[in-house]
Amino acid sequence: MAALRDDRQCDARGLEIDPVNVATAVSRGLSVIQGDADRDLADYPDASFDYAILSQTLQTTMHPHHVLDHLLRIGERAFVSFPNFAHWRVRMSLLWGGRMPVTRLLPVAWYETPNIHHVTVDDFRAYVRERGITVEQAWFLSGDQRTSAAAANFRAEHAVFLLRR
């Protein structure tokens, strides 16, 4: 948010569930309130923002379909990013180790993680297509390197989608 505010002069506002993260953001001069995307996005008026951003959070929401509906209601477009559970390291960890992986983007054990929906790039592509949501652009990343769209389900550690209705 600070980069959007400072580099792009955006009127950026945030909704954060963790009170410690809220306090940290506010201490940095950011406009952040404590709230839960599953419940509190419903309180925002239609077309409140040009863009809504859900960063590395979709997999932690109880009702991702409601959250996405609200994002696309309150913003003309929405950026959605998530860790790709089909990344080859995750697959290998399950195949060879037989255990839920701990990786750079999935840094805690299964019993400590907030992740409740294990989404893959291909799952998300199918999901938005079924719901009539348009993907304007997508970026697939492994570390700080971009990965091709064709290989994204296997090679991307995380994905970023720009969506609109």
Image (spheres, rainbow, N blue to C red):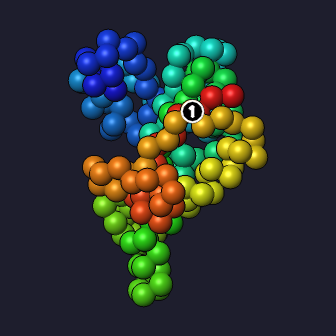
Q: Is residue 130 above or below residue 25?
A: below
Between residue 136 and residue 111, name the one nearer to us.
Answer: 136
Left or right: where does residue 103 sit relative to residue 44?
A: left
87 left or right of 47 in image: left
Residue at the spot 49% in from the left edge and 52% down from the top edge: 149
Report x, y in % for residue 139: 44, 44
Which image quadrant is residue 77 in?
top right
Task: Decide if residue 142 is on the left or right side of residue 139.
Answer: left
Say whether residue 35 is visible: no
Local secondary structure at mark 1: strand
Residue at 42% from the left image edge and 63% from the top image edge? 155
Task: State the image quarter where residue 97 is shown.
Answer: bottom left
Which amino acid, by three-letter code, is at mark 1?
Glu
At a point 41% along the width and 40% down the height, the residue shown is 18
Q: Residue 93, relative to residue 46: is it above or below? A: below
Q: Which residue is mark 1?
A: 136
